[in-house]
Image (cartoon, rainbow, N blue to C red):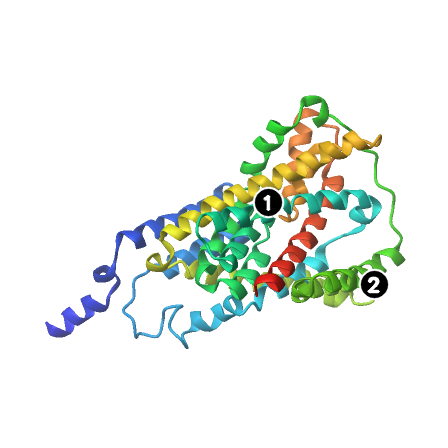
Amino acid sequence: METFLNFLHTGALFNFTWGNFIMLAVGCIFIYLGIAKDYEPLLLVPIGFGMLVGNIPLQWGMNISIYEEGSVLSILYKGVTQGWYPPLIFLGIGAMTDFSCMLASPRLILLGAAAQAGIFLTFIGAVALGFTNTDAASIAIIGGADGPTAIFLSSKLAPQLLGAIAVSAYSYMALVPVIQPPIIKLLTTKKERLIRMKPSKPVSKRLRILFPIIAFLITAFIAPGSLNLLGFLFFGNLLKESGVTERLAATARTAFIDIITILLGLTVGASTDASRFLTPDSIKIFALGAGSFAVATASGVLFAKLMNLLSKKKINPIIGAAGVSAVPDSARVCQVVGAREDPNNFLIMHAMAPNVAGVIGSAVAAGILLATFG
């Protein structure tokens, strides 16, 4: 009987709390959204299942929990806490990204830069809510809609908030098709949404090869703190564009990035233990993240409208929403919104320009914040 009682005390049922129940429900919702609604399934399904893994109550000392040094989950989670996974994700992103859409229309880079306003305005809001500068910087980067960048920066500046920031960033990335269309419609007129843009000119192979080298040198000198992220991003792109390392590029954009995504998603989800995750700060982070993402989307759209006032060559302001770095989902949303107004208006390639510029912009912003507060 004593053995049986000891078993009950160490088991999940005896240690179960309402917090665990809430997080298990959230994990199931994530899995449902990923499978049934097709909202970023490659992210939400691993994160959702990780939440199930992380919220089965365990007695401390069994060396199983993600927060117990030496456990399997703890070892895998070091890729998050020590910032290993984000640069590797960027390597794969670089190997699958075509920057020619941005190079063909350099002025659209400004839309990607404008969308980063959400990051810095959210920083001010987070400080006003009582967060320290380092915590506020980590929360603010959610506005870039770039999960790996949010994880990288928070692992350096606010590791105690890493779980909430990571889940918030990936949640809003997955909900791009829900969040962005109402903001776009609110800020644009039907006439603006019907603007057609001329097809982009082709970009030479030489320029596509030179771009990752030159862009890396420029951004690294501007924001050395972004060295790990942008170094891997542009290296992956060079593998793709060089034409002589296709085997490496193919590996980076397929099996390699898939493996890292699995490990990152599962461990981030498993880190959301209810006792550590369900706190007032987490609620504030989710609220600030939503505001940051909305402001970033609005900034890109409004800046596109401003550019139209100053230029004869009109831009469809819908593509300003793609300035956040949720690649390529935000560009797809722009295409869908535009097609609802005019089925023959193809915006996706134009939207990819600010979209990939947003990836670079959010990494540069993270580098600036790291250099300032690190």
Which residue is painted at 30% across and 75% down in the image? 61
Residue 125 position in % (x across, y down) = 51, 46
Residue 261 visible to the viewer: no
Assign a secondary structure to mark 1.
Answer: helix
For badge 1, the amino acid type reads: Gly
For badge 2, the amino acid type reads: Gly
Which residue is painted at 59% across and 45% down in the image? 118
Q: Nearer the viewer, mark 2 or mark 1?
A: 1
Neighbour tally class for label 1: few under 14, some 14-19, many 20 plus, Cα within 10 Å = many
In this rendered view, identify the residue nearer to me: 160 or 57. Answer: 160
Which residue is painted at 56% across and 39% down in the image? 294
Q: Is residue 135 left or right of residue 87?
A: left
State the quadrant of the C terminus.
bottom right
Location of mark 1 (residue): 118
Q: Quadrant of residue 189?
A: top right
Location of mark 2 (residue): 243
Of mark 2 and mark 1, the one earlier in the sequence is: 1
